Amino acid sequence: MKNIIRIENLIFEYSHLEEEPAIRAVDNVSLNIETGSFTAIIGKNGSGKSTLAKNLNGLLLPSGGTVYVKQWDTRDDAHIWDVRQTAGMVFQNPDNQLVSSIVEDDVAFGPENLGIEPKEIRERVDKALADVNMGKYKKKAPHLLSGGQKQRIAIAGVVAMKPECIIFDEPTAMLDPKGREEIMSIIDELHREGITVVLITHFMEEAVRADRIIIMDDAKVLLDGTPEEVFAQEETLREANLEIPMAASLAHKLRKRGIKVPEDVITVERLVEFVCQYK
Amino acid sequence: MPDEQLALDNINFDIYDGEIVGIIGHTGSGKSTLLQHLNGLLRPHSGTICIGDTDITAPGVLMKDIRRRVGLVFQYPEYQLFEETVAKDVAFGPKNLGLSDEEVEDRVKEAIGLVGLDYEKIKDRSPFELSGGQKRRVAIAGVLAMKPQVLVLDEPTAGLDPGAHKEILAMIQEVHKAQNNIIIFVSHNMGDIADLSDKVMVMNDGKLMMVGTPEEVFGQKERLAEIGLSVPPVTELMHALKDAGVPVKENILNLKDAEAEIYQYLQRKILHD
């Protein structure tokens, strides 16, 4: 498989004050993101997960090591727009991402800046709004929409730039359960359409939808594997002060009491299936 | 702009001393509007609200007294931190009550301790260099320093990571134990509501749709689903098992009981079949 993003020995340091020693937010991380994959990055606040994400499309530039998006080094000024157009980003707070007073203008903002023909912009905006189920709101004012709807507009704005990869930085953290589910099903859909998804989250129930989970702890990669592999490491996760999904936790407790629950039972559906075979 | 709407419609309820009350409802159901009535920040168009023996809707009631008795912690309260140091920020409320300097200092110390922070270590730090969870505690300490009899929290764990989330919940329980005050909180996390609340209130479309113990409220999965609300994830699991034909009790609200119920069932089956 081809890798759309390659991270080689990435180090990222920042300092609040000049006289203070720099804080290392990402410490020598190497990993690749496969084209077309769905990767969730989990970690508690301060673990370095958001800093890592912002290094993936050149919003932050490495202090050491290299990040490549396709063939481009994110530090190469000449290709920074290629990088950003390949890997778009959606942030936590939808209110900080909307720039226009009409939904469709907001979505058109990105493609306009790319210098795309008006006719094509029209098509892209309509398609992007349809993708996030917001077509009928295209003439509305974003500030009258709910948090989940605003976040969908922000996603449409990124989709309209036709990125091959979208990095979602805690896109549901400020939403209610309904808004959260709306966003997650759109992410699933975009992934099915072939977009590479990197999802930064601290909700485990969201992470189980990915095909790969990376756990960040203390600026390093603590675990990296399929959801089944990662959530089987209950002790390691607990030590890192992270939760595991409810079903995985129950399966683990039952295992401790001597019931042979397979390791891949980490979702409610799988747990129900498991119990049902004894019916 | 949308037309005028009834944000709250004929709401009646009592809250008793020492209760923890959880409020659930959709965004836009009237939860936050309701909370803002409890300390007089909003005034009802009709109806009365009594805090203790005081009808706070009566003319001539001093709002200052009401706000001293009912402390309201808004959503994302850390956005309201503004002082240079943590101690000064927490002292802002009690100072405005006109208390003596010593009394203010005592209260600041006590409040910072109550939210689980080390007074000596944190008092001179800037609130802006703290972590998200710490900032939120400092903001809550600012309200606690007013010694409210009723502490109202609007989505106290929104946007926190799981570690900080758990810490804030534990802190709420600690504060409740230490002060035996009334705590009213809003949350979208049904698990938290079930764990903490003595009483659950369900808001929908400006109306109070249900009031009861967590068992009573979450026992009505269908009615909650009609208004787009869910039961705690573990209750959801038990329902899924039951729906799949496994004879288990479905009205279970915590992981421990779920574990026991499923274990019992499986053990019976594995041993005896």
Image: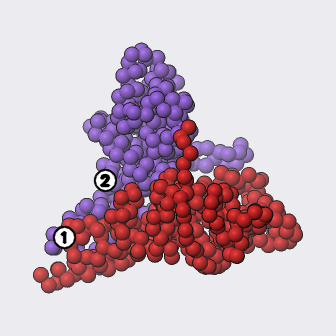
Chain colours: A purple, B red
Residue B49 locus on image (x, y percent)? 64, 67
Q: Secondary structure at mark 2?
A: loop
**Outermost residue toward the front in this view:** B46
The chain under label 1 reads: B
**Outermost residue toward the left in this view:** B273
Q: Is residue B80 visible?
A: yes
Both on one chain, marks 2 and 1? no
Residue that badge 2 annotates: A226
Circle nearer the viewer, 2 or 1 = 1
Q: Residues within 10 Å of mark 2 (few under 14, many from 20)?
A: some
Gap between marks 2 and 1 measured at Cα: 30 Å
Of B258 and A82, nearer the camera is B258
Number of marks: 2
For the point 38% across and 46% down, the residue is A182
Q: Residues within 10 Å of mark 1 (few under 14, many from 20)?
A: few
Q: Is residue B193 visible?
A: no
Residue A255 locus on image (x, y percent)? 28, 74
The chain under label 2 reads: A
Of B220 and B3, nearer the camera is B3
The C terminus of chain A: image quadrant: bottom left
Residue type at the position of mark 2: Thr
Q: Is residue B93 left or right of residue A186?
A: right
Residue that badge 1 annotates: B245
> Is B79 located above or below residue A18 in the figure?
below
Residue A167 locus on image (x, y percent)? 43, 40
